[in-house]
Image (cartoon, rainbow, N blue to C red):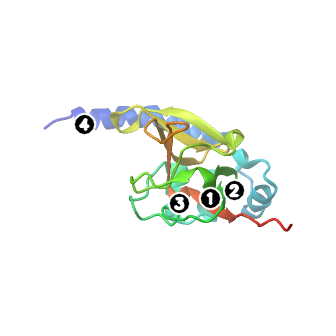
Amino acid sequence: MHRWPYFMSLLLALHILPACTQEDEDRDQTMTVAEARANIAAGTNLSAIPQAVWRQLLPEAQYEVLWEKDTERAFTGKWLRHGDPGVYVTAGCRLPVFSSEHKYDSGTGWPSFWDIAYPENVVLKEDYSWGMKRIEVQSACGEHLGHLFKDGPAPTGLRYCINSLALDFVLAVEKAE
């Protein structure tokens, strides 16, 4: 019987669990769903929303992508072929992150953007999951959005590969002349 995979899984769990537990301990455990909704609408105190409240606010698949760092299946997301003009916001905290002007078809099966429209709302972090080094794209409130790759089009050469479940869309309002 090989114990190596079991040992590695246990070691990994012991390494990750304290970080996850500490992060949620820093959040307001008394916050209600109504208070969280008010914070989201106001765009304030977003990082204080506890995981238990996010579980109540979001559908399961969205929660898994945003807070468990899951990935939706390729070619299944609702924003993949979407082309209307507007702004993509994060599905939980509602932070504007990407513009339709920067969206392109990368052929990978996920919505892709060659630039960030609102850099103050995006955090890039090193990600060593799945045995490889990648750059994780998170929102400023900690939501997992996707990953950044250096195989995109000009002018940046970047591809922000983002889960549709991590985004919502706000249609641009036409200006009256």
Q: Earlier in the sequence, mark 2 or mark 3?
A: 2
Residue 63, visible in the rendered structure: yes
Quadrant including the C terminus: bottom right
- In the picture of the structure, the residue carrying the numbered disc 2 is 94
Q: Is residue 130 left or right of residue 115?
A: left
Circle 2/circle 3 CB separation < 8 Å:
no
Residue 28, visible in the rendered structure: no
Circle 1/circle 2 CB separation < 8 Å:
yes
- In the picture of the structure, the residue carrying the numbered disc 4 is 5
Q: Is residue 54 above or below residue 3?
A: below
> How many residues crowd around disc 1 within 10 Å: few (fewer than 14), some, or many (20 or more)?
many
Circle 3/circle 1 CB separation < 8 Å:
yes
Q: Residue at x 69, y 56 (%)?
A: 94
Q: Residue at x 51, y 39 (%)?
A: 154
Q: Residue at x 77, y 47 (%)?
A: 45
User: Between marks 4 and 2, how big is the CA–CA gap?
Assistant: 39 Å
- In the picture of the structure, the residue carrying the numbered disc 1 is 91
Q: Earlier in the sequence, mark 3 or mark 1?
A: 1
Element type where label 4 sits in the image: helix
User: Between marks 3 and 4, how big is the CA–CA gap?
Assistant: 31 Å
- In the picture of the structure, the residue carrying the numbered disc 3 is 165
For this rendering, which residue is in front, 80 or 54?
80
